[in-house]
Image (spheres, rainbow, N blue to C red):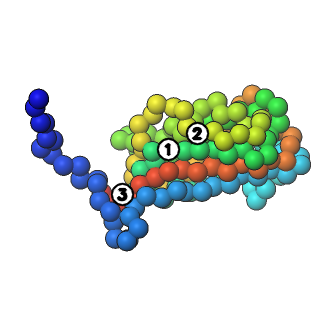
Amino acid sequence: MATITKTSKDANVRLGSTPWGNKSALHYSLATNASGAVIGGNSTAAVANGDKVRIGLIPAGMRIYDSQVLVNVAMSAGVIGDLGFEYADGVDDTAVPQSANVFGNDIALSSAARLRNATTNKSVKLPKAAWLILTTAGANNANASDIEITLDAIAEGND
């Protein structure tokens, strides 16, 4: 039986400058009021079918390898969503293109559940800060809801 050794080492395997390492869980929350509008959002209109909600910023240099959506209080019947990112500066990056569904697609937001990312996408290292976005589909939201999103990431810094 042969022993095979990689001759090039993974440059991104590093602990960083903290004693607890470089693994992070980024936590985001999205809540809507009784009329279906985002609490703390810049609009009082209810989240409608096809709307994009910018939930929070993801720092540059993070490699996201997994995500979970915890629907504590569900949105209206039929509401689904895609979870992804878009760059905060509005300029796409050809090496790491923006994606509306890299962290999950057709996520059922209409019933309470803990949902892990079921896509087969590779991990994504963001070269610059990006918005975590949820793009809704299926139906308009007219319910109060409470949703938490966790991104599991490795802080690799900017190269």
In whole angstroms, how far apart are the C-alphas of marks 3 and 1?
15 Å
Q: Which residue is mark 1?
A: 66
| Classed neighbour count for the residue bearing mark 1: other residues with Cα under 10 Å, few (<14), some (14–19), many (≥20) | many
Tell me the amino acid under the disc marked 2. Arg
Residue 97 sits in quarter: top left
Mark 3 element type: loop
Q: CA distance from mark 2 to mark 1?
A: 8 Å
Secondary structure found at label 1: strand
Task: Kindly indicate whether the residue at mark 1 contacts the one at mark 3 (C-beta within 8 angstroms).
Answer: no
Residue under pointer 2? 116
**In the rendering, at what x and y percent does residue 87 appear?**
50, 49
Q: Nearer the viewer, mark 2 or mark 3?
A: 2
User: Looking at the image, is mark 2 or mark 3 earlier in the sequence?
Assistant: 2
Q: Is residue 28 left or right of residue 153?
A: right
Q: Residue at x 15, y 46 (%)?
A: 8
Amino acid type of the residue that numbered disc 1 sits on in the rendered structure: Asp
Disc 2 + disc 1, Cβ < 8 Å:
yes
Q: Position of residue 96 (x, y in %)?
A: 40, 42
Which residue is labeled 3 in the image? 156
